[in-house]
Image (cartoon, rainbow, N blue to C red):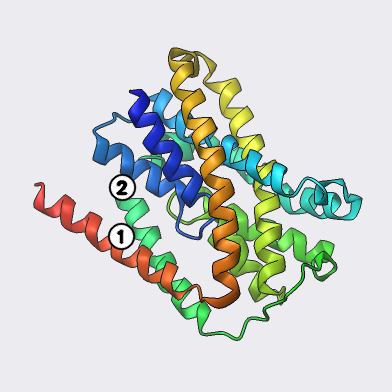
Amino acid sequence: MTFLHALILGIIEGITEFLPISSTAHLSLANHALGIEETEFVKSFDIIIQLGAILSVVVLYWRKFWNVDVLAKLSVAFIPTGVIGLTVYKAVKGYLLGNVPVMVATLMIGGVILILFDRRRVPVSAEIDFSEITYTRALLVGLFQALAMVPGTSRSAATIIGGSLLGISRRTIVEFSFMLAVPTMLAASLYDLLKSHEAIATDVPALAVGFVVSFVTAILAIKGFLAVIKKRSFAAFGAYRIVLGIVVLLVLYLSR
């Protein structure tokens, strides 16, 4: 992997991590487009540079992380992903990561769901009120997040849609989704680091570039996304997912 590859992938990760369009799918598709072989290092690279994007949430929301009630709810929401993730880690990394047909299918299905979901009347709050998220709701949001272990689903989309279906207002569930990404991706990255440290050590400079670039890009993406959801719907993200899936299918068909 070259530094240019790491730079491009860091930008893609930072932009897509918190949008409901699946950062995992975009990274994998970018790897294919750039001709980067799906080695163990590349798979770990795609997981670990997410820490850069997650660090941006810590920087932007550090005050909220000092709230004991919010931390408790994040812990409850993390439980389903933590338990299920440990159970299916090998299967996900071995068979699903880099699986283009699976990602295309989940991108397009998720796109349709986002468009249908957007037709519902979802309350839009001007202020953040985490009291809307009870411990039961937090646990259920965590179950929705666990669906995103299938590449192409989008952790952001799963938690936002799940939370909205539970009656949580849009801005509150969006910011809760941002914060829930911290324990989720931190656990995934550290676990992968323990399992694949030898592969990761082969190109630490590339990891550093991807990490820093994803951090800076994610800060801009989060602020932009929050501005968009105040005035725009999620339907545009759904349409984008469907179009991307169709484009990938056409490219695969024409390349045969």
Task: Count residues near mark 2 (Cα–Cα under 10 Å), then give few for <14, some for 14-19, many for 20+.
Answer: many
Please, is residue 178 above or below residue 242 in the view? above
Residue at 33%, 23% in the rendered image: 2
Residue at image mark 2: 100
Task: Report whether 2 appears left or right of 75.
Answer: left
Judged from the image, the secondary structure of the residue bearing numbered disc 1 is: helix
The answer to whether one can see residue 99 in this image is no
Query: As rendered, which of 61 and 82 lies closer to the eye?
Result: 61
Please, is residue 80 above or below residue 246 in the view? above
Task: Report whether 20 appears left or right of 178.
Answer: left
Residue at 71%, 42% in the rendered image: 59
Comes first in the chain, label 2 or label 1: 2
Judged from the image, the secondary structure of the residue bearing numbered disc 2 is: helix
The three-letter code of the residue at mark 2 reads Val
Residue at image mark 1: 244
Residue 137 percent location from the top left of the image: 76, 66
Query: As rendered, which of 132 and 219 lies closer to the eye?
Result: 219
Residue 48 percent location from the top left of the image: 54, 31
Residue at 72%, 73% in the rendered image: 168
